[in-house]
Amino acid sequence: MSDKVSNLVERIHALQDELEEEFGRRRSAFEYRLESGRVVFEKEVRQRHKALQQRLSSYLAQARPLVVLTAPVIYSVIVPLVLLDIFVTVYQAICFPVYRIEKVRRAEYISLDRRHLAYLNGLEKLNCAYCGYGNGLLAYAREIAARTEQYWCPIKHAKHMAGRHSHYPDFVEYGDAHGYQNRKQELRKSSD
């Protein structure tokens, strides 16, 4: 990776760290803490949250009919999501040890912590769990795919791609045959 690209990647990481620190400062204003990975609100905060919860009946009454009608379509996606979860988890369990690629920790990507929010009604909690699972699972699967790509084909694409993964800047430039032959083993080793 060139010095300029390395510097840009370092600046991006620094900005991401700064963003996480700012999220942390904002979180402190909402009076909760994490104890052994669990969210804990003080009793009076939970009571205030509970008072703000919208009743399920009024929540449903305010929903547009087309929104209600599309719910089965949204929820039907759970089937391919669960299948994806099973397949990428089994794939990683079997193949990553063979390739000596460090395994992706699923728990770092899927978070179902919104159920602790007393201001959400049951349906809102279900929706939040669904979105937390779906987006977390896709990030988990993407990281597994990214580590696989780094091992097997760490070459940048000729065209711009939206949403590149974090390993992409290390890849060899498209068309750099010499660089690919010289760096492919190094890139494989850096994936483990």
Image (spheres, rainbow, N blue to C red):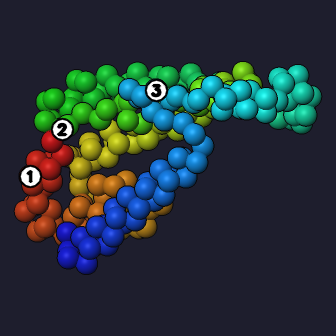
At label 1, counting other C-alpha atoms closer than 10 Å, the crowd grade (few under 14, some 14-19, many 20 or more) is few
Amino acid identity at mark 3: Arg
Per the rendering, the mark at residue 136 is none
- In 3D space, how far apart are the residues under numbered discs 1 and 3 (Cα atoms)? 41 Å
Residue closer to the observer: 187 or 107: 107
Inspect the image, locate mark 1, and give the three-letter code of the amino acid beneath it. Answer: Gln
**Which quadrant does the N terminus fall into?**
bottom left
Q: Which residue is drawn at 32% across and 46% down?
A: 146
Q: Which residue is drawn at 48% across and 58% down?
A: 22
Q: Position of residue 119 (x, y in %)?
A: 72, 31
Q: What residue type is labelled 2?
A: Ile
Residue 51 falls left or right of residue 129:
right
Q: Tell me the SS state at disc 1.
A: helix
Q: Quadrant of residue 105?
A: top left
Q: What element carries label 2?
A: loop
Q: Is residue 116 above or below residue 21?
A: above
At horizontal 9% and vertical 55% (from top left) the residue drawn is 186
* Displayed quadrant of residue 95: top left
Q: Distance between the residues labelled 1 and 2?
A: 13 Å
Q: In this view, does 65 lie to the left or right of 136?
A: right
Numbered disc in front, either 2 or 3: 3
Sequence-first disc among 1 and 2: 2
Asked which secondary structure carries label 3, the reply is strand
Which residue carries the number 1 mark? Answer: 185
Which of marks 3 and 1 precedes in the sequence? Answer: 3
Above or below residue 157? Residue 78 is above
Name the residue beneath numbered marker 3: 38
